[in-house]
Image: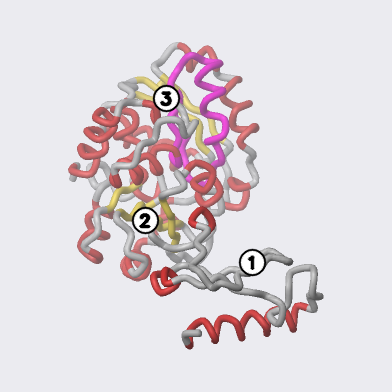
Amino acid sequence: MPAVLTSLAKTTRDVYRYSGRRAGSIDTADSVEYKESSACNQGCVRRPLPAGSSNGNKKPVIDAENILNNSKRRIGVLLPPGNVSVEREFSSFVPDNVAVNYNRMSRPVSVSTKNSMLSMLPSLERAARDIAQCNPEVILFACTSGSFLEGRGREDEIAQRIREYTGIPAVTTSMAVVAALSALRLKRVYMITPYPDEINDEEVAFLAHYGVEVTGYDSFRCEITDLTAAVSSETVAEMARKHRDEIASGDGLFISCTQLLTMDQIEALEKEFDRSVVTSNQATLLAGLKSLGVPTQGLHAGRLFELPATAKSRAVSAAASVS
């Protein structure tokens, strides 16, 4: 048995010994027979055979459907330190052939102010260089307000810095939202956010800079990140329903903030309002998947994901090229 597999078997014995498992629940190492295969040297996982089975002839046995490996397309994501929603939403909608790795930036305290959001940026280089070691094909800066608060026309600067630090293509949530609204031809939108009005007003100006009129907005006005995380997606949907007439008078609904859970509500809201819905996490994930050329139809993340690939690709490319 190769040395690496001998070590693996010993590790397995130690795990079973200290976990207190009994023979017969999951066989102890003394009674476990391992699958032999030349493919093991290519990253395959050696797994115990079911109890009572045997592989006495030692012919190669490969259960391809259950072999773990890291041969996947890969997206890197940079998050604010207190964000707990992006990982939950992305994991529910990302295709099986794509892996997503996450890293967090730093800031002293997670409060919803302009100064606090911008205080993450000094840690951008460290976070970007670290996530680059996972070898992603694209890096997403997954924070809406954190990528538009530096000023109008500067929303892509963070992505430019990430590209300079790592040599890897990058997209910010702000520009992913612009691309999504453009792809769906949404020029007049109602907006829902969790932000205090200081940031809401900045966001209205940011969208106006890119030709999108915010016809009105409502907000949970959360002062700290933890309060935003506590808002359920159903609560977001209930707020939207209170403004159905205002939404109906425009082209669609935009729900802002990557900390706000929304993606499981998109299809139902679109059907109910007969209007397209764009959310920060939806737009950000789409930008990552389209950068990889991965199909998004059938993922149940709203009309945006069902658009023809050419329309989405043009929109994402246009957003990435804005400076």
Q: Residue at x 28, y 53 (%)?
A: 170
Residue furthest out toward the front: 57
Which image quarter: residue 135? Answer: bottom left
Q: Is residue 186 above or below residue 11?
A: above
Viewer-proximal residue among 271 and 146: 271
Q: Which residues are magenta?
A: 253-281
In this rendering, position of residue 109 left or right of residue 32: left
In this rendering, position of residue 212 left or right of residue 300: left
For the residues labelled 2 and 3, say whether their Cβ atoms are less than 8 Å apart.
no
- Whole-number angstrom distance, CA of label 2 to CA of label 1: 31 Å
Q: Is residue 260 above or below residue 140?
A: above
- Whole-number angstrom distance, CA of label 1 to CA of label 3: 45 Å
Residue kind at label 3, given as amino acid type: Arg
Residue kind at label 2, given as amino acid type: Arg
User: On residue 303, which mark appears?
Assistant: 3
From the image, which quarter does the C terminus lie in? Answer: top left
- Magenta segment includes 104: no
Find residue 190 and report its horizontal and vertical position in percent.
45, 23
Find residue 61 and report its horizontal and vertical position in percent.
52, 64
- Whole-number angstrom distance, CA of label 2 to CA of label 3: 24 Å
Q: Secondary structure at mark 3?
A: helix
Residue behind mark 2: 74
Find residue 31 and report its horizontal and vertical position in percent.
71, 78
Q: Residue at x 56, y 23 (%)?
A: 268
Of callouts 2 and 1, the N-terminal one: 1
Viewer-proximal residue among 261 and 153: 261
Mark 1 burial class by Cα count in 10 Å: few <14, some 14-19, many 20+: some
Residue behind mark 1: 49
